Image (spheres, rainbow, N blue to C red):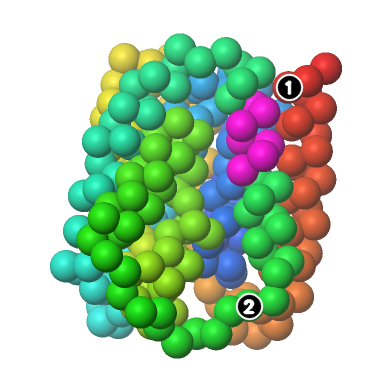
Amino acid sequence: MSVLFLALGAGAVTGLALGALGGGGSVLAVPALIYLLGFTPAAATTASLVVVTVTSATALGAHAREGTVRWRAGALFAAAGLVPAAVGGAVSRDLPAALLTGAFAVLAALAALRMLRPSAAEGPGAPARTSRVAGVGAGLGAVTGVLGVGGGFLAVPALVNVVGLRMRAAVGTSLLVITLNSATALAARTGSAMSVDWSAVGPFAAAAVLGAWDGKRLASRLSAGSLQRVFAYALLAVAALMLADAVL
């Protein structure tokens, strides 16, 4: 099967998961780029940032039109993560492939386990101190920079429980945070980005954007709990594969 068809198929599945689940779908991008398209872990995390930036920016526009983006809160939260995202993006290319693969496997497993937990109440939490908001935002930025994921599965609960947003606003605002962090981390990787196969990344990103729209429609027709469970178990299998690859 040609690289083009593999890129389109993997991008469509990644976008479908992103659109249907809101957070966590981008975790599929890195393993797809490594095991289907033959990218190195460093190149895959860079390419994943392209996909995440484009897809989240597109989705951000739709949520902005619906009025679910809290610009001030999102900008403040993202600001804390911009420097860690840039630093993480710069140092990631020099990390051993096994370390990147193992760290990503752990992150994927955590994302899956969080999806399998019963959903928390959708009401906002009490706003936390500025120092805690900054700490959580910085941590999310670092994860985005090093591992090339948007971190929506981390950003949404943080915006609810730490910043105090309601769930609907947290989902929209998380896209602002993800877009800014991903773009910053990608800019920090300018030197390594030239080694990425853009003939594969371009179709992958385009298919992810289109798949996200289909995923959004799918989510309105099927049980969110069922979708999350199927995706979580698939993600656990991916995590196990990547962890074995890193260790063996």
What is the quadrant of the C terminus in the image?
Answer: top right
Q: Position of residue 115 (x, y in %)?
A: 67, 65
Q: Mark 1 points at which residue?
A: 246
* Magenta residue span: 101-107
Residue at 69% x, 82% y is 222
Sequence-wise first label, 1 or 2? 2
Helix, strand or loop under label 1: helix
Count neighbours of disc 2 (C-alpha within 10 A) and say few if under 14, some if 14 to 19, many if 20 or more.
few
Residue at 48% x, 67% y is 157
Q: Which of 56 and 239 is in front in this view?
A: 239
Q: In this view, does 50 lie to the left or right of 66?
A: right
Q: Name the residue under label 2.
A: 119
Helix, strand or loop under label 2: loop
Q: Does the magenta portion include 103?
A: yes
Count neighbours of disc 1 (C-alpha within 10 A) and say few if under 14, some if 14 to 19, many if 20 or more.
some
Q: Which amino acid does label 1 sit on?
A: Ala
Q: How many marks?
A: 2
Asked if residue 5 shows in the view, the reply is: no
Judged by its main secondary structure, the magenta piece is: helix
Q: Nearer the viewer, residue 104 or 61?
A: 104
Label 1, label 2: how far apart the Cα atoms are: 32 Å
Q: Position of residue 65 (x, y in %)?
A: 26, 78
